[in-house]
Image (cartoon, grey):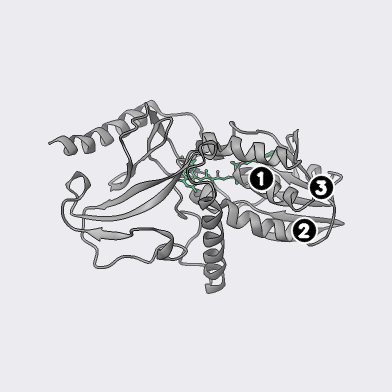
Amino acid sequence: MESQKIANKTLVHNYGHGGGGITLSWGTSIIAAQLASKPLAKDIAIIGSGVMGLTTALILSREGFNVTIYAEDFPPNTTSNIAAALWLPSSYFDRSIVKPEFLEKDRQIIRGSFSRFLSFVNVPRYGVYWNNYHLLLPKVRDSIRALPGGNDLYPNLATSTKDNLFGYPYQSYMKALIIDPMLYLPAILQDAQMAGVKLKQTKFDNQDQVLALTENVIVNCSGLGASKLFGDESMYPIQGQLTHLLPQPKINYSYVVPTPEGYLYMFPRKGSIVIGGTAVKRAYSTQPDQQLTESMVRGHADLARKLTS
Ligand SMILES: Cc1cc2nc3c(=O)[nH]c(=O)nc-3n(C[C@H](O)[C@H](O)[C@H](O)COP(=O)(O)OP(=O)(O)OC[C@H]3O[C@@H](n4cnc5c(N)ncnc54)[C@H](O)[C@@H]3O)c2cc1C
């Protein structure tokens, strides 16, 4: 996240949020909107209509700016639409290289985002609900870890070493928010439009085309697209594959279990049970892998059998 001046344009970047983009969206977009409002230009262009573009556009429009979103894809066809999506800041920076200032800013972003998401809980059109979340581990940990943003953001946080889900030796338990992006994205798109945001379907091939827009302030919320559009070679995809099962209203818990291959996770929504998951760095294909689907379903079925045995 940063602001740069190119000729007479102000370009604000709000991209690269890895596996935590839905979670962080309000926190990072509040900062992006502050940077974009500084030049006091009335008209602002947003590139991208995923969770970042929509949230940034909504904030700026409510502040009175004339906002237009330019994007190749709109919901339901963005990456944001296919997120899992648990409210948990994860997988978006390398702890070994960040400075303390980054961590302090990160904490503010996380806390700011969390408080905004609370306002959507149990409002049906947003699809944001509390859930009983279990992190299940094969080895006992000595103490509760410090969670991103502060442990007070995770109600009922506790650990236990017996009577755990699926018989695991150790579990960390808490209440966590689950966001259904298939409801949440259309809802904030609608909010943005009601606030006056205009939408223009546009594909940009390079930075010059972006800078040719009439608006003098441009917010780049192009997600992975920023890599090509703005030549950011540090960006790479993390490919994730999910499977949706029919909804089961009685399932009110979610879990994450580490496996030799990665993780298995399950997040129940009103419309489906989402199971995952894979996280393959630098894999570009968006084609689902049938074998992977089958092995994931098998992995979850093996866990579920432990509930009944
Ligand atoms: C399987 C999976 C599970 C996930 N689980 C979680 C989770 O549990 N919790 C969580 O917080 N996050 C999760 N994420 C991460 C989250 O989905 C992303 O961080 C977030 O959606 C990124 O949002 P974005 O708006 O930056 O990008 P996107 O949603 O990718 O939107 C980018 C926008 O930019 C536009 N664009 C790009 N290039 C161009 C161009 N050249 N011209 C015009 N328009 C362009 C696109 O059309 C699109 O509108 C998950 C992701 C995946 C894939």
Mark identifier at residue 53: 1
Reading the image, the residue beneath label 3 is: 211
Q: Nearer the viewer, mark 1 or mark 3?
A: 1
Q: Quadrant of the C terminus?
A: top left
> Amino acid under label 3?
Leu
> Amino acid under label 1?
Gly
Q: Between 265 and 189, which is closer to the camera in this rendering?
A: 189
Q: Earlier in the sequence, mark 1 or mark 2?
A: 2
Cα separation, mark 1 vs mark 3, equals 17 Å
Label 3, secondary structure: give it. Answer: helix
Q: Between 12 and 129, which is closer to the camera in this rendering?
A: 129
> Is the CB of mark 1 within 8 Å of ligand 1?
yes
Q: x and y percent of residue 277 in the render?
A: 38, 40
| Few, some or many residues within 10 Å of mark 2 (<14, 14–19, 20+) | some
Reading the image, the residue beneath label 2 is: 37
Label 1, secondary structure: give it. Answer: helix
Cα separation, mark 1 vs mark 2, equals 15 Å
Q: x and y percent of residue 42 in the render?
A: 85, 52
Label 2, secondary structure: give it. Answer: helix
Taking 290 as reference, is 239 left or right?
Answer: right
Answer whether labels 1 and 3 touch (C-beta < 8 Å).
Answer: no
Inspect this view and state whether residue 284 appears. Answer: no
> Amino acid under label 2?
Ser
For the image, the number of numbered tags is: 3
| Few, some or many residues within 10 Å of mark 1 (<14, 14–19, 20+) | many
Looking at the image, is 292 positioned above or below residue 28? above
Q: Nearer the viewer, mark 3 or mark 2?
A: 2
Mark identifier at residue 74: none
User: Which residue is situated farthest in the bottom direction here?
Assistant: 100
Q: Residue at x 50, y 59 (%)?
A: 93
